[in-house]
Amino acid sequence: MSAKYKLILRKDMRKDAAADAKLYYASANTTGACDVYELCDLISAQSTASSGDVKLILDELVNVMRRSLGKGEVVKVGELGSFQLQFGSTGTLTEKEFNQALIKNRRIVFRPGKLLKEAVKNYTFEKITVETPSTPSGGGEEERPGEL
């Protein structure tokens, strides 16, 4: 499988770089999105479950994950990977000073399973070029919409 990328000119973040130095970096390019309804249709086409059945299971997975993550459990979803709640906090000098209002940056961390990790390792990469509109040549007047 070939993953697409484009080049982006960004600030050079190397330690010895000049203040105004820039380098080109690869940036993953998305070509669209696969929403939950399309995902359900694709899964149902490869199984005996209907699209509605798949949607019902995914909805219930979210409900179970909400409860399990809230209890501090790591949710392992087979070859898909695992999900875990993480957060940070502001520090205090003493344990007594700490309260839950100091907890910040709540997030769910996803760790892909072995099959997904291996799939990404096997991708090849293809550079895409951003097309710029061509400019008229020949020195004549430009054609204006509505004029002949």
Image (tube, rainbow, N blue to C red):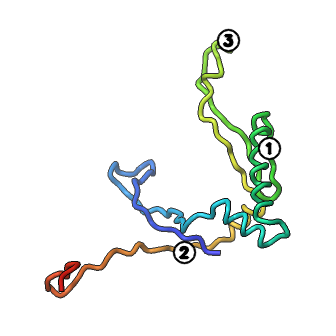
**Looking at numbered disc 1 in the image, what kind of residue is underneath it?**
Val
* Residue linked to disc 1: 64
x 79%, y 45%: residue = 75
Marks 2 and 3: CB-CB under 8 Å? no
Separation of residues labelled 1 and 2 (CA atoms): 39 Å
Q: Is residue 123 above or below residue 148?
A: above
Specify whether 31 is left or right of 99: left
Specify whether 67 is left or right of 87: right
Query: Where's residue 61, x and y in %?
Result: 78, 49
Locate the N terminus and report the quarter of the image it occupies: bottom right
Of residues 13 and 34, which is closer to you in this image?
Answer: 34
* Residue linked to disc 3: 96
**Looking at numbered disc 2 in the image, what kind of residue is underneath it?**
Glu
Q: Earlier in the sequence, mark 3 or mark 1?
A: 1
Of residues 32 and 10, which is closer to you in this image?
Answer: 32
Separation of residues labelled 3 and 1 (CA atoms): 34 Å
Quarter of the figure with residue 35: bottom right
Q: Is residue 24 above or below residue 144?
A: above
x 72%, y 69%: residue = 42
**Looking at numbered disc 3 in the image, what kind of residue is underneath it?**
Lys
User: Please, what secondary structure does the residue beneath circle 3 have?
Assistant: loop
Quarter of the figure with residue 79: bottom right
